[in-house]
Structure formats: structure tokens, C-alpha cells
Amino acid sequence: MRMILSYAVERALPKINFRTSIMRLSSVLVALVFAVLSFALWSLSNRPTDVPVWPQWVKGYAFSPFRNGQDALIDNMPSEAQIVEDVRLLSESARELRTYSSRKSLASVPVAAKQFDMDVNLGIWLDTNMENNAEELSSGISLANLHDSVTRVMVGNESILRGDFAVSELGALLDSVREQVEQPVSTAEPWHVWLSHPELVQHVDFITVHLLPYWEGVHVDAGMEYIKLKMSQLKAQFPEKPILIGEVGWPSDGRTRGSAVANTANEALFLRRFLALAQSEGYDYFLMEAFDQPWKAQSEGGVGAYWGVYDVNRRAKFSFNEPIVRVQDWPVLAVISIFVSILLLAFFVFNSVLLKARGHSLIALIASVAGTATVWILYEYSQKYLNFTSIIVGIFLLLAVLSVMVLLLTEAHEWAEAHWFRDRRRCQGPVPLKLSDDAPKVSIHVPSYNEPPAMLIETLNALARLDYPNFEVIVVDNNTQDESVWLPVQNHCRSLGPRFQFFHVAPLAGFKAGALNYALEKTSENASIIAAIDSDYQVERNWLRDLLGAFVDPKLAIVQAPQDYRDAADSAFKSMCFSEYRGFFEIGMQTRNERNAIIQHGTMTLVRRSVLEELGGWGEWCITEDAELGLRIFEAGYEASYLPYSYGRGLMPDTFIDYKKQRFRWAFGAMQIMRRHARELFSSQSLSLTRGQRYHFLAGWFPWVADGLCLMFNCLALGWSLAMILAPDSFDPPLIMFSLLPIVLFGFKLTKVIYLYRRRIKASVRQTLAAAVAGLSLSHTVGLAIIKGLLVKDMPFFRTPKCAKRSALGQAFSAVKQELFLFLALLSAATVLFVLPREYGSPDLLVWILALVVQSVPYGAAVFVSIVSSFSWSARLLGKNIERRLFTSGS
């Protein structure tokens, strides 16, 4: 990844000329403009809000003195010394504390409160554990009778709301405690419980109500109206009873509920507004709560940890007097994000001196978004209370964030260089060779295994028509067992004359690479150029004449023409495949050629024989021997040239399963290459490759690696969604900032494909959509290949069958069993999460549901393309000009 980001610091031009200086000045100006805009956006989103200042004294705090790592659920209690420290801190600004339990160390609170002249609203915790209830009641009654700092007693907390007690049962307990203590007695419930069960009021001396508008999805700006409304309703129904607001507050972090957004700024806004309202209305209250309680996240979701005025380390979470801003340290974060953005921009733009201003601007925009988003996500996550599990999850999420940002930048860079370029610095046209008696001899190698003889004979006939005086053709049939397949080809080679040699070799190891190496051994001594084509390719007469002239450059080792296909008009399926292939050859290979970093593919390629022999021939260990050879040639310091002109056309896979197997081989081979060439590709100390070459090889394969990561993400997403369905109180949807990542990446890549296909390739709308769908249909296959490539080193070579029969519909579904399962599983999870009843909507949940739907699209595309491959639908469905050649022939 470091090499993907750092390639551009290498100077691509031998000296900086005036034009280069102007272009780099343009890059600097673009960076400055986006830096100013970024800082302005940070400033705009953090405008200060004036609200009433915090009073010198508040009436009281809800007091749970648990520290980080302590947990009331397992009786891991704070020490008495820690409780004294907390009471001392709160005594500086509050008159009273409300506790929730009277057991164990919490029984020391009345003593500590007396020491600092504070009153205690003593809590007796009740739940379904009868043994603990008995201990709570006994301890609470004793403490109330023993300490004059206890001014009120609270029997139970939201016991009716949770369903732990019936009203009659709780009423009996309240009456019993009232008989045994002198202090006023109550129980605490939300406002609607009191209104729904007015009979409960008969058993209390005062009403204790919880007013927490966050839980009801109320916007923070409507919070005070909510408080006044609920208090007026209670006063109207119970005019004779005093009302105590037992809990009132707002969380500083957590999921958004309806219109209620949990953040520190909103907590400060709500509490400071409430304190002013309470003073004017004369409310009695306890702020919810004194300190953050991370242990509560287990029972209340993540938001349960963040209700404190002070964090778990006893630091105030917001200013009590200054105007409120969304992020107090926003200037620092803004500067960091701008620095990161400029750094990313420098990596990707400063060496792209031939980009137009729009290209610079696109990369600058993505760099700014990536830098700001990364800084913001890291900041937000750093503000959370982390345990071992959340740290591990955070590490994986951080890797996911960085991967998405890098992928966005590499995609944006290719987009810019493919469309908004001023010139192509490296030769893009043919260099025709003047024919003469001393024209270099070319040895054309055609490997074959179990190929249809009629097809291969047509390939040889095309070679016989070459407009070049000095060449030979070596056909190597390796391991074909059926004589009726290879004998007709052997006989046809004899009929074509001495230029054509046929070898049937069985057994022969090394698959296609083994056959090519065998052909190299049989090559004439005076042949200086090796040409390789697949057995299905019919070449143009001017292929050799147009391409050989480039070899006058002694550093040039490869001249590569694109793969092209002649059967795009056979069916709608093949026309979809044809549209998908075009992106690589008309966009990717051309941008790669600018930095001498093309992917060599084993057909329509010319290689200098001396270099091929110097490097030991084709790699028989690798199932993508062509790309691996190209990388070795670059490592040896040689150059390659890509000419975007069609000089030969072959056949595409006939079925979707073959299409998948072909792409699986390519992706698995890429992993083989990365493992074998890891030092040259990843080490910044390696001198064998330029940074531009390392960048293009890694950036070109990184989307495939991302497919592997995406497959793992989807499996985890299904597991998490299932947990959300089965245990909604314990499993929240992932944070919105992480759920957005796959959606943003999918949208950006789709936009890029549509734009480049329409503007650069001049494809029709239908062809563009067909290319997008066909590419998406292979995502799962590529992901599997990447994961397998991480686990194993080798696998058998798969030959793409030619002239195969079309799959039946049943076979089409069988070919995509895994994709169909994942497609249905993701959509089902999204549907269930959407229809499950929830009291309040959550943007986090909606975004997660959308992410599941988006992630299901590639699997649905695979099912769709497989079905299309089983029917003989006309290619005209994709447009009338589907037969147009990939490139204009360069004659």
C-alpha cells in the first residue's frame, strides 16, 4: 500500500522544463484551493452556539461511581476511597446525589456525602433476583435510618418499565418501606408509565419521573418544549404530588434515534438549556448523570456509556461557560486533514505533469475527501471507550477505511489519467518495418491443448497469410489424448509448408508455460523475436510488419497488441463479456504504458528472444505465466510498448462458468506473482522496478484484493445482521461512518465506469451497463481467488474451452450456487432488518440496510449474467454496433 501511495515522488522526466513547472504550479494552486475550501467547511460545521452558562450550583447528579473496568453487573465495585474522591469533586458544584443501589461499597455514599455536606437520594435496586432484592431493601432501610444525609429513598428504578414487577407488587414494597423509614419514599419511572398507571401514585410520597427525550427521538432543539410538555401533563394529572425529575440528560455518543443525534455538543446544548429552564420553572432534578459508565453499554447499547457530564476519567466533557462548538479541537483536526490531503495529492498529482486541470481537480477532490474522512473517522473512534474486543474491531475497521481510501485514490488517478491528459509521452502508434532480405526472423509459438481442430486450422491459415517474409510457426500440442483432435492439425501444418512445424508432446509438464518453453527449444537459431498467440486467434496480415519496427530500441523487450474478439455478435452474453474486456485494453493498458508498466498477456505479444532466454523462459510455476514474464522483464531493466491497435481476434468463453474460471485463474495468478515478487513490489529499497511500475502493478491488482476483503466483509456483515435480528438490544448497527464506506466505493466505481465508457470508449448506454454488470458478476469469483491465493501457492492451470455448448438453465443456476445464496442472504437480512418493528428510526440502521443491499448487487449480477449465458439472446440487445472492432487496425 505504501508503494501505491509513494510512486509519484519519482521524477518521470529527466529534467524539469518550463511546461512541467507550469503544470506543477497548477497542481499547487489546486491543492491550495481545496485546502482553503476544506478549512472553510470545518469552520462552517463548527460555528459556535451561544447558550446559557452553567450555574454555580446544580441541584443534583445521578451518581454511579464506577470507574473504567468496573462493572455493576458482576459486582466489580468501586472502592470507598474512589467514592470519596468522586463525592469531593461533585460537591464543588452540586447539593445532592441520587444513588441506585445500597449494597456493598455503595453503602458508603451517605457517609462520604455527610463529609462534604451533601444530601443523598438513596436508591434501592430491584430486579428479578429476589435474594439481591432482600439484601437491597435491608441495607437501604438501615442506611436511611442511620444517616441524616439521606433525605429521600427511591425504591426501584424503572421496575414497571422493564416488567420486573406488577404495579400491585411494587406498591406493596413501597408501602412497606414507607412504614420503616422517616424520609419521603418514591420509585422512578418514565413519564408515560406514571400516566398509564395512576394507581402507582397512591404508594409514593412524591413522583420521580425520567425525562430523556433522546430515547424518544426528539431533536435537541425541541428538548425544552418536550420537558415543559411532560411536566405540565404530570402536574395536571397529579396536582397534589410533588414531582422530582429523577433523570434528565443527553448522551455524548451513540446511535442516532429519529431526530436525536448523540454527540458532545448536543449534550452541552441540552443540559445548559435545561439548567436555565429548571431555574426559571423551579424544577427539582438530578442530571443524568455525573460520570460516563462504560459498563452500561452491555445492557443499554453503546449509548449507555456516554450520559456523564464528566467522562470516565473524571474530566469535564464540554465547556460550562464558553459558546458550544461541534468539535472543540476542530482547527487541529482541520490542519491535520489538510496536511494528509495535500500529502495524498502530492503522491498522485505531482508526477502527473501532463494532466489537465480537471484531472488535477478530480484527484484533489478525492484526496481532500479521503484525508478528511480518514481523520474524522479516527477522531470519532478515538473518543469511544475501547475494550479488547472493540480495539480488535477498530483495527479491522481502520484497515477497511484505509483500503477504501487507497482504492478511491487509485481509481480516481486512473480516471484522471485516462481522460484528462494533454499528451501521451510514449509512442502509441505502429512503427512499420521496411521489408528487406535482412528482416529479423520471428518464431511464432502457438500452444494448444485439446482445441477444436477446425478452429486451430483457421488460426494457422491466418498466420500463413502474414505479409512478412521471415517467420516460422511452431505449434505445440501438449497432452491431448485424442488423436482425432491433434492429427488433423499436424496434417494441415504439413500442407502449409516448411515454415509450419507441429509437435505433439505427451507427457509435458508446465501447462501452457511448459508448451511455450518447449517451443522455445525448437526455435530456429537465427530467430531473434518470439511471438505468441493463443490457438483461437486469427491475426491480421500486417501484424508483424507493423510491430517489429519498434525493436530498433535495444532496451525494448516486449511489443504488445491488445486482445480482441471476433464473436461478440454471437449472443447477448458474449457481447456483455466483450464490453467488459474493453475497459482494460482501452483504458488500463494505455495509462500503464505511460510508465512502462503494462501487463503482458500471452497472446498478440512479441518478445525479444535474447531477453526471454536470459531470464530463463516462461515461468512454469505460475498459472499466469505471461504477466509474470512481463514483470521479470521490467525487473531486469527492459522496456515494453503497448500499441492500442487490433491485429488479431480470438474467441471469448462460451459459458458463464468458463468466464468465471478464466477470471479466477487471472486473479489467483496475480496472487502467485505478488507472493513470488514481494520484495521487488513492496520494498522501497528495491532498485529493479521504478516506483511507477510498482504502483501500477499493485494498484492494478488492488481492486482484486479489495474483492477478497469484500467477501470477508460480507460474511461478517451477515453474521452481525443475524445478531441484530436475534438480539436487537445487544447488537447495534455498525457506525454510519463505516457502513457508508462500501456504498461510497460502489457509487464512485460505478460512476467512473459509466463516465469512461461513455466518454473514452464511446460505448452506448446499454453497452456501458452491460460492462458494469459483467464486471460485477465476477467480484465473488475474484474474491475467492484472492483468498485462496493467500492460503495456497499453486493450483492446476485451467484452459478456457473454445466452441463449448451453451449451458442449460439448470447448469446456469448451478454455476452460481454460492452467489445465489449470498444474494438471497444479504437481501433477506436487509429486508428483515427493515420490517422489524422499532420504536424509533435510526439513520445508522437505514444506512446499514442500504449497505447490505449494495453488497448484494454483485451476487445478483452473477446470477443474472449466468442466466443470460444460458439463452441464445441476440447481441443486438446491446446495440447495433456491437461488432465494431475494439481498436482501429494500424496498417
Image: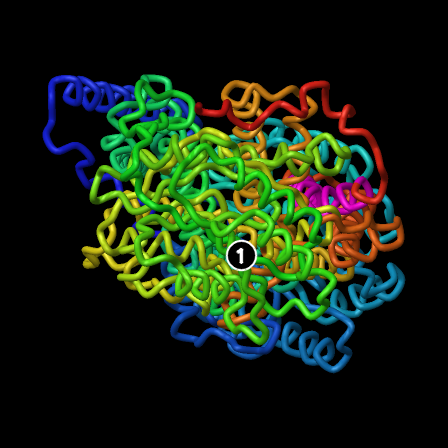
Q: Where, quadrant-wise, is the C terminus in this rendering?
A: top left
**Residue 286 showing in the rendered view:** no
Which residue is more in the foreground, 246 or 600? 600
- Asked if residue 817 lies left or right of residue 668, the reply is right
* Above-or-below relation of 79 to 295: below
- The three-letter amino acid code for the residue at tag 1 is Val
Where residue 142 appears, as percent x and y from the top left, is 63, 76
The residue shown at (31%, 18%) is 422
Residue 18 drawn in magenta: no
- Whole-percent x and y of residue 272? 47, 35
**x and y percent of residue 417 in the render?**
37, 28
User: Which residue is found at the position 45% from the left and 34% from the top?
Assistant: 543
Residue 147 visible from this viewpoint:
yes
In this picture, which residue range is highlighted in magenta?
847-868
* Front residue (pair 787, 338): 787
Q: Is residue 713 rendered to the left or right of residue 232?
A: left
Q: Is residue 447 left or right of residue 42?
A: right
Residue of label 1: 475
Count of residue discs:
1
| Relative to 746, 137 lies left or right | right
Determine the residue positioned at 60% across, 30% down.
Answer: 224
Mark 1 is surrounded, within 10 Å at the Cα level, by few (under 14), some (14 to 19) or many (20 or more) other residues, namely: many
